[in-house]
Image (cartoon, grey):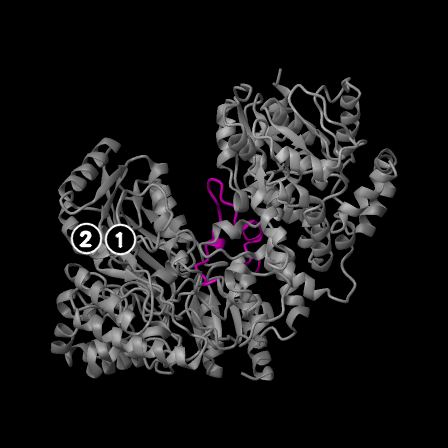
Amino acid sequence: MVDHEAGELERALRRAVRGEVSFDTTSRALMTMDASNYRRVPAGVVAPRDADDVAAALAVCRERAVPVVARGAGTSIAGQATGVGLVLDFTRHMRSIVSLDPDARTAVVQPGVILDDLRAAAGAHGLTFGPDPSTHSRCTLGGMIGNNSCGSHSVAWGTTADNVRELDVVTYGGERLRAGRGLDGLPPRLREALRALVDGNLALLRTGFPELPRRISGYALDALLPEKGADVARALTGSEGTLGVLTEATVRLVDAPAARALAVLGYPDESAAAEAAHTLLPHGPLTVEGMAADLVAGATGLPRGGAWLFAEVGGETRAEALSRAEALARAAADATTDHTVVADPAGQRALWRIREDASGTATRMPDGSEAWPGWEDCAVPPARLGAYLRDFRALMAQHGLRGTPYGHFGDGCIHVRIDFDLLTEAGIRVFRGFSTDLADLVVAHGGSLSGEHGDGLARAELLPRMYGDEMVGLFSRFKDLWDPAGGLNPGALARPQRMEENLRFAVLPSRPVDVEFGYPHDNGDFAAAVRRCVGVAKCRNESVSGAAVMCPSYRATGDEQHSTRGRARLLHEMLAGEVVRDGWRSEVVRGALDLCLSCKGCRSDCPVGVDMATYKAEFLHHHYEGRLRPAAHYSMGRLPLWLRAIATLRAAPVANALAGVAPLAALAKRVGGIAPERDIPELAPEPFTRWWRRRARGAARGGSDERGGPGAGPGGGGASAPGQPAAGAARPWAGEAARAGGRAQTPTVVLWPDTFTNYLSPSVGQAAVRVLEAAGLRVVVPPGPVCCGLTWVSTGQLDRARSVMRRTLDVMAPALDAGLPVVGLEPSCTAALRTDLPELLGTADPRAARLADSVTTFAQALEDHAPDWRPPKIDRPAVGQTHCHQHAVLGDAAERRLRARAGLTGELSGGCCGLAGNFGFERGHYEVSVACAEEQLLPSVRGADPAAEVLADGFSCRTQLDQLAGSRARHLAEVLAERLP
């Protein structure tokens, strides 16, 4: 569509509809892809507010012959949620549960309703919606109806089509109708045409469809047979938006078991598990899911075996559910290698998370190479699954391909991502050849090309191999009856495009682009790093539970561009250069990345390990290269320099006094790009390193400092030993580090004096010294300034960050040579040492990897190097937050164990505090920063027991609590030090 035609379409739509009309670069770029291998660029996007808006938008498009595609969460895996004309985005407005009738066990929903929202509403009445794909936390009912989604509980409750009662749709031609059972409610034209189609092809419709639980491919024309009640709603379900646009649906609800138990059964291998799956069905399980060891390597909690079946059962009580699960496990015992039965809900969730994340984890092979959908969900009769899988594996080997099958074994449905080479012509030929061969194999086993996700652009071309030309001809006739103009989702299902057309990889650069980070998990290729995002959209979850973090800015704004997936899509389009045309200078991409908190939550929570914090730093580096930067990059990106200068001049009291003068503070914030709502944090009158040196001098004189106590170690290279004076400040760092490293009887650790601890909260460092010494460890502190480079990295000043890191390595070389562990207190700095430093410096300096490997957290250091030490008993509840970088990079298992040993009870909240280093201080970020804090952290602290200890190891988290809640939080080291003798 040329620009003037797009402009005319946009103006006409703005006149016709009340919802948002978006033809800007960002909106179009966000809709180019779904979770498939395909990419189609739309002309624009409309977010309709109601059915009238849908009808009006269709009328405008019909007048101009513009195609239309309806879209929910965009998690479709076959490409059917992409389109070249107008996208109707139902996730913004049409997402209401119109009514819920617990007596009739039905609900009326709009297409944008998120499945988990419906399940929560139904759950209040002991009901649920049966189909539950792994994307249940973000997929929409409209998308599920379009694809005929299923999920893991289909052995009990069937597919979406089995749970649909009536559908309100608008056709491309403008007809509004309600489809249910029978033809009487349809417009006369359509009613008579459908009757003629069915009556004229009764034999074919009765014999041409395979009987299996997961037959999703093609149009369900057999549902129109008179003996099946001419179920038009069933025939429309799974039509992928090619026949009409859904505006409302009446769906069936089912009784939710009051209690559930999960039997995880181990088998020698995948074939044994596949052969056994259908034999469990007589026991009435709710699910029978299967996966093999090559998918879940390293997962904990699974019984012994090379493959597993997850069989869930229900009951009126936990005891009943547990008894049924144990009975199922006993019945299967002859074929299993081991089993475990879990009735605890938390334990079940942990195990199910392994399965639900498989749609993302399967996108990488064990060696890190990429794997793709395309044959994501073919299905065969359950009793034939074992034989089919053996043939499937053999076919992959024949074509030189690898994949990790898993999925709904009880229904005979297999998910798999395969390491297709979709970047070269030769690889694409292999993709096509394998696909046609596999289609024949599926048909030979009596199966369906799609068992859950639909045919879309990926498999519709192969439907004649499954159904024959005559039946596929009927599909085209059926499409023409509903959409004679062909305006709805052309290229999908009927008259499909070729499977290798519109692949999303074709537009990417053929050679790696020049970048600063090493991207070690993507062979140094930034495009490959961006390709990690396959669109499963876990980042679009609107709430998080437990310790999860990703993606706080999306949850605060609800805007796709501020999700991890949205940002990855924009970077993809930036590299493609078609929609986003100004490369690294793009203001569209910069705008989307601006609200990325660099929390690193996606690095751990995204199933495929997208690392948007690193991508943002990379982008900012190139975007501002040779140009004037935002003021905040100079004020906060170079914060270590400013704080060091103030400390050198001993000007902290003066700076604090000036910050207390409102006009001067306002001016400073304005010049520095700092949000006016923020208070400037107070500087410590004495940095930690100066305290350390002063303490060492007192110890060298044989006395004790009134604030440090005896047994201190010098910052100039000395070390402390419990109950012994230090050796003296003059002792060289290199010599002391080497000698300390050899004292097996007194384990020695290097305490990292990060910028935040050193200049803003030295009490944390002082407390850590006391605790580490009390645990029997010698403490050394690097001489002179060291820095992880975090503030330069987060603002994209990567050349400067690299210089800072190299100087740090020079200082740390003696400790690295001595093999000393480096204890970090500030999680963000510790995480930067662990990841940013080696990934930015790469392999050119082997010291970078050595430093990263030596870094440990405070709690982990105590656990590893003082395992017999017992912390003082606090015996009080604890609230607060696990730092997002701790969660994403470092892990908090040791911290949890240390808190438990100290008697600090309760769980810390997840999410992100919202301050996130410089983010929450930058002008324009305050509202999002507060919204992030209000999600979990602030409510947990406000609702806590007044006696609770408020814990926050991160300086940002403590500052956010202080400024937004007036609550004083402390580092775990401070809490422990306070109770030491």
Image position of 445 (left or right of 367)? left
Mark 1 burial class by Cα count in 10 Å: few <14, some 14-19, many 20+ = many
Q: Please report the residue visible at 25 percent of the width from the left and 76 percent of the height from the top.
A: 437
Image position of 643 (left or right of 535)? right
Q: Work out whether residue 812 or residue 30 is closer to the camera in this orientation and state it.
A: 812
Amino acid, disc 2:
Ala
Residue 582 visible in rendering: yes
Q: What stretch is highlighted in magenta?
A: 533-562
Classified by dominant secondary structure, the portion drawn in magenta counts as loop
Q: Please report the residue visible at 55 percent of the width from the left and 20 percent of the height from the top.
A: 874
Q: Name the residue under label 1.
A: 290
Task: Note whether 185 is above or below 106 in the view shown.
Answer: below
Residue 859 is situated, as x and y percent measured from the top left of the image, at: 55, 32
Residue 737, by quadrant, is: top right
Q: In which quarter of the image is the C terminus?
A: top right
Q: Please report the residue visible at 28 percent of the width from the left and 81 percent of the height from the top.
A: 476
Q: Does 290 lie within the magenta span?
A: no
- Residue at disc 1, secondary structure: strand
Instruction: Report the disc number at residue 277.
Output: 2
Residue 961 visible in rendering: no
Residue 475, by quadrant, is: bottom left
